[in-house]
Image: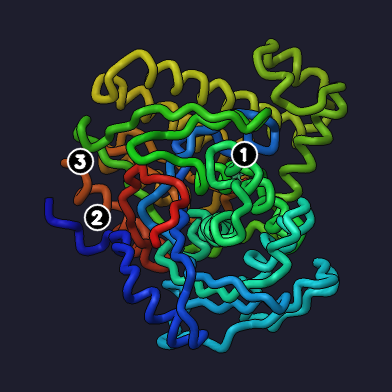
Amino acid sequence: MTPHPLIVEAEEAQPDKLRQLFRETFRQEPEGIFRAPGRINLIGEHVDYNAGRCMPMALEHSTFLIARRRSDGLLRATTRLSDSGLSRIPAPVTVPLNGLTPERLSLPVEAGWARYVIGVLWALIGQGHEDVAAGMDLLVVGNIPLGAGLSSSAALTCSTALACSELFGLGLSDDHGRTVLAQAAVTAENEMAGAATGGMDQAISLRGSAGHLMLLDCQDFSTRQIPFDADGAGLSVLVIDTQAPHRLVDGQYAERRSTCERAAASLGLSSLREAHGKPVDEVLAGLHDDVSIRRTRHVLSEMDRVDACERLLDEHPLNEIADRIGELISGSHRSLRDDYQVSCPELDTAVDAAMSAGALGARMIGGGFGGSAIALIRRTQLDDVVQAVSDGFVRHRFTEPRFLLARPADGARRLA
Ligand code: GAF
């Protein structure tokens, strides 16, 4: 099928070109090239930090990290990310790793992204992997649209974590080790970058499997890979990047998270997961303010939708249940919009327009307040849906949206 002109295709990895860029930047040969993907989440939104289950998929769109160890305790890092508009690579930021703490780290505003990579080395050293303190030169090149809610930040932290494991011989590259790397990536994002992310994004970026959705249980971070052959079923998962700026560090996400934690505590539970399966009315009757009731209702109903989606995928061929999965996806959007209140006009417009053009289901994904939506569509509807969303954005005078196709790819890998 000819690619649609408005769809951003994933770039092929070009190890020779990446090696050359590294040489030009650091005047040294790199030791390794790593790739970590962005993600979408089919269903199970804002449940990871409530110890719930979600069903993300790793994307072909990835971050590439080219690296070499140092021996003088310095981390030098620079980037050419797809949206940065940079025609050349800026001078690296240089940070001594010895005695580093989040409070002591001071970076120029334009190098704020480097907190994510610095944070991973810091977190691994904190876990006892002291070899990492020798330092590294890192170059980051990526084609995950930034700020699009597709986890470009997790791709950054996870590619760094895998590079550390491989180059310093930490032995953390198998599936069990990757749970440790994912934890370091979460710590980096939470503590060094100030983003209160919950763990889903790092888990899928490190542990995803091509051709599969990953059912992730955030109670113990166990996973089950569920085959998902959308192409074979004549379906596509269309990603609509609304280009509305999305930020995890602006307080709204952290506020949702603490409301859930308070609701669980007031119910005498360690997490809302423990309330899942109990009669919802009884659980909600134990809460006394409208906001906690709405947030909890979303979390519990979303956990139900994940269970229902899992059952459908386990028991039927995808082409026979696509419309029912679509209904679950749309139900998730309504709940995120009305009860969790994390949508925004651009996301609602994208969802409504996709549905009006015949999508089977559509919803916002990720933290919300901007970023991306997904639409489950029959492949033959692609042009109509893209057109309807584009027209809707023109009518509302929103920035032109971008589109991607979500095809399940592998988690982070060493390329060379
Ligand atoms: C963001 C967070 F980083 C994830 O941990 C998750 O909570 C998601 O929002 C909402 O499901 O992507």
Residue drawn at (62%, 41%) of the image: 179
User: Between disc 1 and disc 3, whose residue precedes?
Assistant: 1
Q: Position of residue 363 (x, y in %)?
A: 45, 41
Q: The residue under label 2 is which amino acid type?
A: Gln
Residue 342 seen anywhere in this rendered image of the structure:
yes
Q: Give the structural element (helix, strand or loop) at label 3.
A: helix
Q: Is mark 1 within 8 Å of ligand 1?
A: yes
- 381 with respect to 223 (left or right): left
Q: The residue under label 1 is which amino acid type?
A: His
Residue drawn at (26%, 48%) of the image: 385
Instruction: State which mark lies toward you, 1 or 2.
Output: 1
Q: The residue under label 3 is which amino acid type?
A: Arg
What residue does disc 1 label? Answer: 46
Q: Position of residue 91 (x, y in %)?
A: 57, 88
Q: Quadrant of the C terminus?
A: bottom left
What residue does disc 2 label? Answer: 387
